[in-house]
């Protein structure tokens, strides 16, 4: 490994280099979740009635508890907009400079759309760096011909564009997103740095919202915007966009709820912003993690707690973007395999924080919930296979208790889906965003389709980690290019 100052900072701040022992709290929580699954599975072969489907009941109760938690903490979004603005309307501190690093590897098809959105922001960016991770498509020709950039040497930052004075090109040999981003972090000169994937389009006011947030709250070290998924116009793309749209709505409301407890861990790398000095202080992005953005937030929280710093992580409802999402089943499964595999990596590296009250609600509640989430797919898939087993073995009488639990859960999900759309509309300031009818239909269909697909991707993530085959994989960028085509 490199001995650069950034890599040395990573070694000091990442627990994976010190191999911390697993404390009893973490062993008890992780082991307890696994033991409960084993006991409930054993009961399926020994008990009758509702106990035979105990693993399904546990799954339903856990998921419902999380919905109630999010609903309780997100209820404040129903207040008037002036009371619920995520980032301050009037900055109380000095105006922070904001730059953006656009991570790009063979993104020539969508890069013009991304750059157009960045160059036409209502609040102009102070610096834009295209972090080219060894692209071999038409990226180089595009940047030179359309954007007035001269090709720099490998590993170097170009001079400013002759057409766009804030635009620069960092040309790197292909080494992965994290390594390229780390180099860009060291070359960019702004106080706050946004990270945007080459297939992400920012809304026109997104930079203004980010600048307000970081100018108003000096303790803010990381923030994520609200993202809408965009898929291709194929049949599978339309179906997956429908499901993912409402999944993203619920997920971002969940992030809002956890940020209320200063326990937010998930920042979307497709559209995030960081205080540059804080990220450099903890060692930048970890190139050995499958979800480098998620792992970085753990490291920032850990550093803040050990150093007594009041660092905060937020989700900004007024900073919005659209990003390319998987448009077919295999692409979706590969994405979720990587996401869940990286989640397991991070959970293992930071296992000593689980249940540790020194980290506040993050240690006492958020990380124990994440410990349960490591086995949530196992619970869900086991519950499904048990239902198949009841039918195959002729134990039809066991289906009634299971059907009752499933029916009650669907009713709860229906109510929550409809309410979540209302909360989301108020939060992002768009009363026409999302459809109540489509949310209703999604709540009915998801438990038997999309939810099983998510769990399958997560199970694949478990397999890839256990077999040492975890990798990024490839994903075609089809959605934004199709939706933004002009006649």
Image (cartoon, helix red, strand yellow):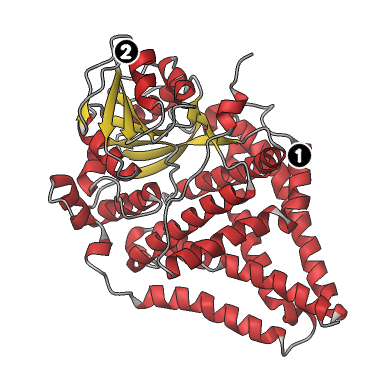
Give the side of residue 115 with respect to residue 279, left or right: right
**Across the whole image, how many numbered discs are drawn on residues?**
2
The residue indicated by pointer 2 is: 148
The span from disc 2 to disc 1 (Cα, nearest Å) is 45 Å
Residue 332: x and y, percent?
58, 49
Near mark 1 (Cα within 10 A), the count class, few <14, some 14-19 or many ≥20, is some
**Which residue, as the protein is rendered here, is positioned at the far top?**
163
Quick check: can you spot residue 429? no
Helix, strand or loop for disc 2: loop
The residue indicated by pointer 1 is: 438
Contact (CB < 8 A) between labels 2 and 1? Answer: no
Residue 252: x and y, percent?
55, 43
N-terminal of the pair, mark 2 or mark 1, is 2
Quick check: can you spot residue 459? yes
Helix, strand or loop for disc 1: helix
Q: Please tell me whether mark 2 or mark 1 is closer to you in this view.
A: 2
Residue 48: x and y, percent?
78, 86
Near mark 2 (Cα within 10 A), the count class, few <14, some 14-19 or many ≥20, is some
Give the side of residue 242 with respect to residue 444, left or right: left
What residue is rendered at 34% in x and 38% in y? 220
Q: Is residue 437 above or below residue 159?
A: below
User: Which picture quadrant has residue 136?
Assistant: top left
Q: What is the quadrant of the C terminus in the image?
A: top right
What residue is rendered at 63% in x and 49% in y? 329
Q: Which mark is residue 122?
A: none
**Which residue, as the protein is rendered here, is positioned at the far bottom?**
46
């Amino acid at each position: 490994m490199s001995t650069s100052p950034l890599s040395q900072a990573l070694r000091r701040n990442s627990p994976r280099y010190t191999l911390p022992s697993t404390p009893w709290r973490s062993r008890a929580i992780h082991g307890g979740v696994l033991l409960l699954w084993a006991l409930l599975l054993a009961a399926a072969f020994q008990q009758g009635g509702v106990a035979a489907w105990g693993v399904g009941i546990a799954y339903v109760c856990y998921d419902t508890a999380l919905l109630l938690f999010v609903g309780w903490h997100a209820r404040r979004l129903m207040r008037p907009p002036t009371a619920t603005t995520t980032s301050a309307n009037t900055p109380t501190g000095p105006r922070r400079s904001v730059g953006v690093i656009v991570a790009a590897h063979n993104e020539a098809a969508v890069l013009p759309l991304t750059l157009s959105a960045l160059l036409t922001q209502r609040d102009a960016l102070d610096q834009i760096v295209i972090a080219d991770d060894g692209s071999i498509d038409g990226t180089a020709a595009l940047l030179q011909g359309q954007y007035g950039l001269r090709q720099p040497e490998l590993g170097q930052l170009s001079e400013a564009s002759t057409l766009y004075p804030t635009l620069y090109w960092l040309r790197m040999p292909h080494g992965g997103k994290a390594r390229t981003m780390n180099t860009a972090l060291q070359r960019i000169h702004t106080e706050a740095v946004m990270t945007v994937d080459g297939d992400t389009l920012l809304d026109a006011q997104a930079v203004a919202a980010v600048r307000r947030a970081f100018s108003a709250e000096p303790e803010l070290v990381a923030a994520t915007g609200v993202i809408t998924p965009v898929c291709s116009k194929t049949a599978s793309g339309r179906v997956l966009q429908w499901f993912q749209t409402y999944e993203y709505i619920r997920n971002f409301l969940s992030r809002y709820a956890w940020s209320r407890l200063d326990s937010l861990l998930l920042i979307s790398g497709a559209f995030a912003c960081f205080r540059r000095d804080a990220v450099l202080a903890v060692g930048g992005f970890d190139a050995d993690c499958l979800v480098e953005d998620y792992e970085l937030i753990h490291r920032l929280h850990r550093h803040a707690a050990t150093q007594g710093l009041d660092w905060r992580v937020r989700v900004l409802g007024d900073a919005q973007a659209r990003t390319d999402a998987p448009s077919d089943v295999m692409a979706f499964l590969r994405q979720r395999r990587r996401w869940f595999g990286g989640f397991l990596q991070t959970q293992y590296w930071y296992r000593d924080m689980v249940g540790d009250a020194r980290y506040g609600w993050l240690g006492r509640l958020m990380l124990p919930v994440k410990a349960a989430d490591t086995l949530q797919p196992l619970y869900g898939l086991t519950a499904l296979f048990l239902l198949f087993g009841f039918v195959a073995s002729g134990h039809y009488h066991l289906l009634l208790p299971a059907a009752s639990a499933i029916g009650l859960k669907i009713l709860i999900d229906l109510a929550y889906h409809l309410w979540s759309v209302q909360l989301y509309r108020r939060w992002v300031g768009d009363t026409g965003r999302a459809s109540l009818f489509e949310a209703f239909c999604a709540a009915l269909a998801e438990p038997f389709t999309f939810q099983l697909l998510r769990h399958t991707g997560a199970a694949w993530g478990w397999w890839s980690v256990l077999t040492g085959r975890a990798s990024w994989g490839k994903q075609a960028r089809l959605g934004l290019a199709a939706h933004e085509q002009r006649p």
